[in-house]
Amino acid sequence: MKKHPPDLRTDIGGIQLKAPVMTASGTFGYGAEFDPFMDLNRLGAIIVKGLSLDPSKGNPPQRIIETPSGMLNAIGLENVGIDAFIREKLPFLEKLSVPVIANIYGQSMDEYVQVATRLDAVDAVAGLEVNISCPNVKAGGVAFGVDPDMAAAVVAAVKTAVSKPVMVKLSPNVTDIVKIARSVEDAGADSLSLINTITGMCIDIHTRRPVLANITGGLSGPAIRPVALRMVWQVAKHVEIPVIGVGGIMRAEDALEFFIAGAAAVQVGTANFINPHAAVDIIDGIESYLEQHGCSSVTDIIGTLEIRS
């Protein structure tokens, strides 16, 4: 009798995925850019580049540089804006058989709500990923995601305004990520993705100037994976909603660590710059691992970390 392949399906707070691997926002464009390199329909979901109410040019160059085991970027959330996304980018995406999740951000509570409301009315968008690492211009530029009360307030405002599932992307640049996670869970978040990039910088020793025009940028890639894994493990133990692991996932083995730590799914980001079909390769590797270990479903390994007593 032929054995059935392992079941790769997973649920992330109301969004059903055929595979537990998504693309991380900001690393996959609007999806069409990677169409020549892979079968996009094999992905669990596509999370598009962060969207704002109006188009944004982002930061001036230089705004990206390779670092040991990682990458620093200060793109500044460049994007086409919500109107151009709906008009120009969604027609391609809505032809696919995978959920499309829109990453959104704003400089104020009202901006978050306006973007979320517009996308909530679009059938082709399955859910929202709320980036709370952005500065609140009305609070002196403090990022929404570093304060539990501000984080909860923006999530509650978005949840009140929409009917689609809301994923919240957490910043690692905090003292207690569990406290932030609990605050946004209490505010109504349907799932959590963590982590966003870690703030870092790089200096040109010959000019004695910052390499990035923005001075600091977000560190991603394998260098941050141990930090992301630790935070996912901590948060997954203390919340009831699904946790999505993000940070330096380059191979199937990396993703499997996150599942064992408690993640219900993962996002692949920096790997896309090195290997444009990384996400599909990782899906294949996860399936092979499950077959080798006699697992019928990816859910069999989620949260199975054994701690020695």
Image (cartoon, grey):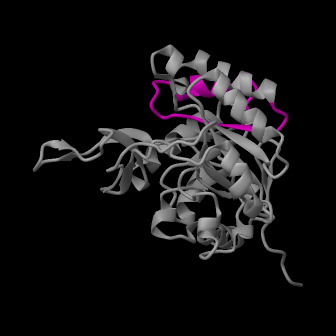
Q: Is residue 175 magenta?
A: yes
- Outermost residue, right side: 1
Residue at image point 52% right, 64% down: 272
Above or below residue 120? Residue 146 is above
Above or below residue 245? Residue 90 is below
Q: Is residue 174 magenta?
A: yes
Q: Quadrant of the N terminus?
A: bottom right
Q: Nearer the viewer, residue 210 or 54?
A: 54
Residue at image point 69% right, 26% down: 155
Range shown magenta: 162-189
Above or below residue 56? Residue 141 is above
Residue 173, picture quadrant: top left
What percent of the width, then of the height, locates residue 205?
12, 48
- Outermost residue, left side: 206
Above or below residue 142? Residue 68 is below
What percent of the width, then of the height, locates residue 68?
30, 56
Asked whether the viewer can see residue 171, the reply is yes
Q: Is residue 34 left or right of residue 43?
A: left
Q: Quadrant of the C terminus?
A: top right
Q: Nearer the viewer, residue 3 or 95?
A: 95
Asked whether the viewer can see residue 309, the reply is no
Residue at image point 36% right, 45% down: 60
What percent of the width, then of the height, locates residue 232?
57, 41
